[in-house]
Amino acid sequence: MASASAIGKLSREEFRRQKDLEAARKAGTAPAALDEEGKPINPHIPQYISQAPWYLDTGAPSLSHQRRPAATKPPNEIDSWYDRGARAGPAAKKYRKGACENCGAMTHKKQDCLERPRKKGAKYTNKDIQADEIIQEVHTGYDAKRDRWNGYDPAEHKRIYDEFEALEVARTKNREEEIDKQTATDLAAARKVAKAGKEKKDVDPDFGSSDEEDADEDKYADAADAVGQKLDTKTRITVRNLRIREDTAKYLINLDPESAYYDPKTRSMRDAPLKNLPPEEAKFAGENFFRYSGEAPQVQQLQLFAWQAAQRGNDIHLNAAPTQGQLLHEEYEEKKEKMRDINKVSVLAKYGGEQYLERAPREVLDGQFENYVEYSRTGQVIKGRERAKARSKYPEDVYINNHTAVWGSWYDLASGSWGYACCHSSTHISYCAGEAGKQATQASTAQALLASSSGLGSSSAPGEQTETSKAPTEQNYSKKRVGEGDIAIDKERLAHALAEEKKRKAWGGDEDRYNKRKRGEIGTHDVTEEELEAYRMTRLKADDPMANYVDNEHTY
């Protein structure tokens, strides 16, 4: 079976012959094709397997591109490594030219020498010349280069382990000697006095005395496990694995699954199983109650101090000598407090900043004082001195430009601005005009201007003019125009307003002339509800700018 490159571009006749040959080989009437090694190629192998890629094509039918290439590396290549410290033959007796000036070896220079630098090198002394190292060439493969343990000697680990064990044995022996030296306590002295008063008894030299055995029992009594717990004296880890069977189990006190969580692994329930019951009355109030109530925290601190002191080599045992542990703990706390004060003084003396640590009394910070002040029903001080008000850093109650009130004491609802309450002036740092300023401000409002303009065309008295002009003004500024509440419309006025609206439209585009004529007749330009309703009734729909709008885009 020829490859694609060997076939090239075939003619129609050659392609037909090749297909007939392949069919004959599959049928068994023609011999199978042979590869480079003379082995027959199965004609039923698909073309995508038998056809070699362009970078492995040899020009002849073959299946070598499907086979694994023969291994070119030796099987023990992954185990090969440098022979550490190997040297070639005996060392030279005289220094050779070109050798290391420090040790005399020919395989390296002085800069690369790993020997200890000598005061006088081998070049000048010709003494202790080292042998030449063997320069090895180790050809490592892919796996050997990436093997992190390649070249490691297991005997090295055994040597390190033995050294660690020796250090541990020496440390334990030293610890035992320190404990033996510190056992001369008051209890040992009392035993010696008691021993001296007793009669001496004959002791068999082959066996030790009972007193020595008692001492050994006291010495190693700490290593024994207490009842119901497994105690490691080195790590001080207690594992409770028993309970008194007569007691009710913690998880049976409250069967509600939403109650306190019970950890079955450590057999602990930190919270109280019965929340509505006081802890003093409950049989079991949770381990946190016993752990953090009463003198339990102090005992925990004392026990922790005893453990830490024992680890440092001190002979302290809280159960054997509780008074001694308590006294030593108090002494330790005093020394700790003194050292804290000494460190604080030294830091302040070196860096300064003591003034920043000074703090005002708590009575001043909380605003509490002992001065007695008595008030009357009206709030006047009868006895004592009234408490001074806190003052800010800004000037207060400072009146300028003849004002009797500060800026911001008055707010104008019409203009939405702040001003002075004494003159109703909204201009900052203006001169106070007093009551005259208030009247001027009131007269300059929009309502006052509209009311004053309505009296220009009337010849009535000022009092009557004010009363007549107040009605349309209040009507314009009433909340009913906004749409709040009901509006009462007079039918006669509405008919009159409709007639006037028809006359206005009859004038056409000359509305200014009509307005002048109307202003001369009526004497006011205020729009009433009847006129507004007449305008709405007579307004054509064509006046609406959105009346003729047609949506040409059919989006729905």
Image (tube, rainbow, N blue to C red):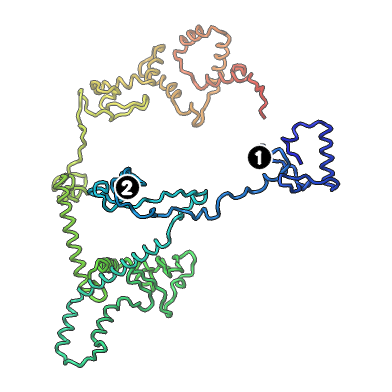
Snapshot quadrant of residue 422: top left
Snapshot quadrant of residue 495: top right
Report the disc number at residue 56: 1
Q: Amino acid at mark 1?
A: Leu
Q: CA distance from mark 2 to mark 1?
A: 50 Å
Q: Nearer the viewer, residue 441 or 456?
A: 441
| First-in-chain label (2 vs 1) | 1
**Which quadrant is the N terminus positioned in?**
top right
Query: What's the residue at 68%, 45% (across, down)?
Result: 64
Q: Residue furthest right?
A: 29
Query: What's the residue at 46%, 48% (across, down)?
Result: 137
Residue 529 locus on image (x, y percent): 51, 22
Residue 210, visible in the rendered structure? yes
Q: Amino acid at mark 2?
A: Cys
**Which quadrant is the C terminus positioned in?**
top right
In the image, is residue 146 above or below residue 304? Answer: above
Q: How many marks do you count on the picture?
A: 2
Snapshot quadrant of residue 534: top right
In the image, is residue 201 above or below residue 347? Answer: below
Residue 386, visible in the rendered structure? no
Label 2 neighbour load within 10 Å: few <14, some 14-19, many 20+:
some
> SS at mark 1?
loop
Residue 158 locus on image (x, y percent): 39, 64
Which residue is denoted by mark 2 in the rendering? Answer: 113
In the image, is residue 64 above or below residue 449? Answer: below
